[in-house]
Image (spheres, rainbow, N blue to C red):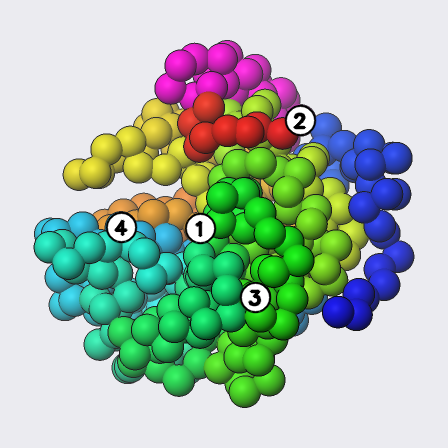
Amino acid sequence: MAQQNHPFSRRDFVKGGGVLLGGLAAAGASGSAAPGAGAGPPGPGKVPDAVLGRTGARVSRLGIGCAYFQRKQVTPAGVRDTLHRALELGVNYLDTAPTYGKPETGFAEEKMGPAIAEIRDKVFLVTKTEEPTYDGTWKLLKQSLQRMRTDRIDLVHLHNFGDEKVWGDHKLVFGDRGAMGALREAKRQGVVRFIGASGHLHPTRFHQALDSGEIDVLMNAVNFVVQHTYDFEHKVWSRARHMNVGLVAMKVLGGAVREEGGFKVDEKYYEKAIRYALSIPGIAVAVMGLENIAELEKAAAVVARAQTLSPEENLELARVGLELSATPEWKTAYGTPLA
């Protein structure tokens, strides 16, 4: 398989030690990290947008993590109302996966289907594959298309790429008979526009994805606590940014603390946690699990007014995060390895 050449290689990254993020405020002001970079001002109270790296797609800086739609109490009607309200607030980025759900509670993609059929041209739709083979990935793609009542998906991630048990056979995965072979064919057919890789753990494995030259977007677990452990910001994103790969943060509030609701990050850090993610150089979108309209409106209000963290705020948040990162609930929050 032909490799694309990039001016900033993995060897350069390792040799140079990456690009430090110590001055988030200064770095953010000079790149696409600034809210709404490259766009005119959003409407009153609306979420600004940004360009998603080399995809060229303009997406909202807040994304809805649709995993929460799998919960039993969430109905298709509730999802429809939430997604229509999202568009009113300027939010167009929807992130889901075929594995979000089970028969007894319903699948997120199925609950989204009726709404997607109504608003498909207005949203940037993201799903995933966790099948390393060509046939397995095509099966999941067809299932997602059917569930969400659409004929195309904007972005498909290799789901949890840090999991070596699924993605460990690099030659298979990136070959013609692997998942990437299927995604390349799906792009040729116009079923998929862009290819990404998502994940919570094993940051250094993501360099294998970047080495392929075929990854347009990375979505990783990023927040002010796990910057001290997983640290995708330095270990991977510094290089990805130089390749103009789109950057999307997940687990901005730590993820769900329990099935019925709530976030891992304490409520008192809610706003600063979001601002931390949006202050990272090069980031386009912060994806947050949002179950209903009230949660959506709260998050949208924060993102709409978010300012880059000052050096003093960043230092204090780093101190708090460092203390939390050593506690049992955060030490290996998303699994191992951390490297």
Dominant secondary structure, magenta: helix
Distance from disc 1 to disc 2, alpha carbons, whole Å, reads 24 Å
Q: Which residue appears at 49% of the width and 13% of the height?
A: 326
Residue 72, horizontal then vertical, whole percent: 12, 52
- Residue 293 visible in the current orientation: no
| Amino acid type, residue under disc 3 in the picture | Gly
Q: Residue under label 2, please give it.
A: 311
Nearest the camera: 101 or 250? Answer: 101
Q: Nearer the viewer, mark 1 or mark 2?
A: 1
Residue 83, horizontal then vertical, whole percent: 29, 66
Q: Which residue appears at 73% of the width and 43% of the height?
A: 238
Q: Is residue 138 magenta?
A: no
Nearest the camera: 288 or 174? Answer: 174
Magenta-tinted stretch: 309-331
User: Helix, strand, or loop for circle 1?
Assistant: strand
Of the numbered discs 3 and 2, the one sitting upstream in the chain is 3
Of the numbered discs 1 and 3, the one sitting upstream in the chain is 3
Q: Nearer the viewer, mark 1 or mark 3?
A: 3
Q: Is residue 310 magenta?
A: yes
Distance from disc 3 to disc 2, alpha carbons, whole Å, reads 45 Å
Distance from disc 1 to disc 3, alpha carbons, whole Å, reads 28 Å
Q: Residue under label 4, please give it.
A: 68
**Circle 3 residues within 10 Å: few <14, some 14–19, many ≥20:** many
